[in-house]
Amino acid sequence: AQKSALSNNQIADWLQIALWAGQDKQVITIYNSYRHQQLPARGYAAVAIAYRNLQQWQNSLTLWQKALSLEPQNKDYQRGQILTLADAGHYDTALVKLKQLNSGAPDKANLLAEAYIYKLAGRHQDELRAMTESLPENASTQQYPTEYVQALQNNQLVAAIDDANLTPDIRADIHAELVRLSFMPTRSESERYAIADRALAQYAALEILWHDNPDRTAQYQRIQIDHLGALLSRDRVKDVISHYQRL
């Protein structure tokens, strides 16, 4: 009785809410109960994301195709399909589709997607170029060489920040970069949480080093602000508020 009582839009709502709650397996269970109904595109997209989070690439691609058959011009769905193609190892197909998507005007989200594809494909110079192009023109030139920090992003950031030979500014820059990467929409929730956790751990280490050091006041203030971002990325809203109030 419950199944017949729910409209297709209500089922899509349920799928989206379960996805937002991080319940990927529940999303799949719900979908399997209603898979023979004609859902709106957003419902199929939610299932596609859940499958992607669970690293079930082919199932995810099937659902992206369902969503795109209903809304072929939806850029978010197109990017979702492209990123999943990259996850599945279909790098060339992903790049071709991304080029088609980006045929109008370049878009920052497309550049981030391009960098993600190149990262998975091991093409790190191309990844660096796309990441650098995705930054706003005035993102960091006042403080540090963007290319340097971007070159460290392939899982080398944590090791680099512990290098005592780096200047305090560069160490603060790398901490800031970890926080920024934790917000990247091209990553799964578990990836973003893992990066945010690394940023939190590095903050704790730098906080001890710089807390009572008058020569590190500027860098100390920087990591305090960036720490808010890491907490927010980890959904620790109460901690964000309390930390902000202490600044």
Image (tube, rainbow, N blue to C red):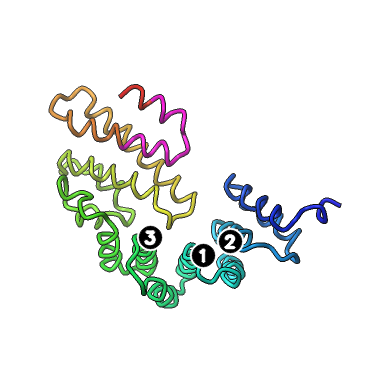
Label 2, secondary structure: give it.
helix
Give me the residue at 57% from left, 47% from top: 20
Label placed on residue 77: 1
Amino acid on which disc 1 is placed: Tyr
Q: Which residue is labeled 2 in the image?
A: 45
Q: What span is colored magenta in the figure?
A: 226-242
Q: Which residue is labeled 3 in the image?
A: 109
Q: In which quarter of the image is residue 208?
A: top left
Amino acid on which disc 2 is placed: Ala
* Cα separation between marks 1 and 3: 12 Å
In the rendered image, residue 80, in percent from the top left (x then y), is placed at 49, 64
Q: Which residue lies furthest to the right in this view?
A: 1
First reached walking from the N terminus: tag 1 or tag 2: 2
Asked if residue 237 is among those painted magenta in the image, a careful observer would answer: yes
Amino acid on which disc 3 is placed: Ala
Asked if residue 39 is among those painted magenta in the image, a careful observer would answer: no
> Image check: 142 left or right of 222?
left
* Cα separation between marks 1 and 2: 7 Å
- At label 1, counting other C-alpha atoms closer than 10 Å, the crowd grade (few under 14, some 14-19, many 20 or more) is many
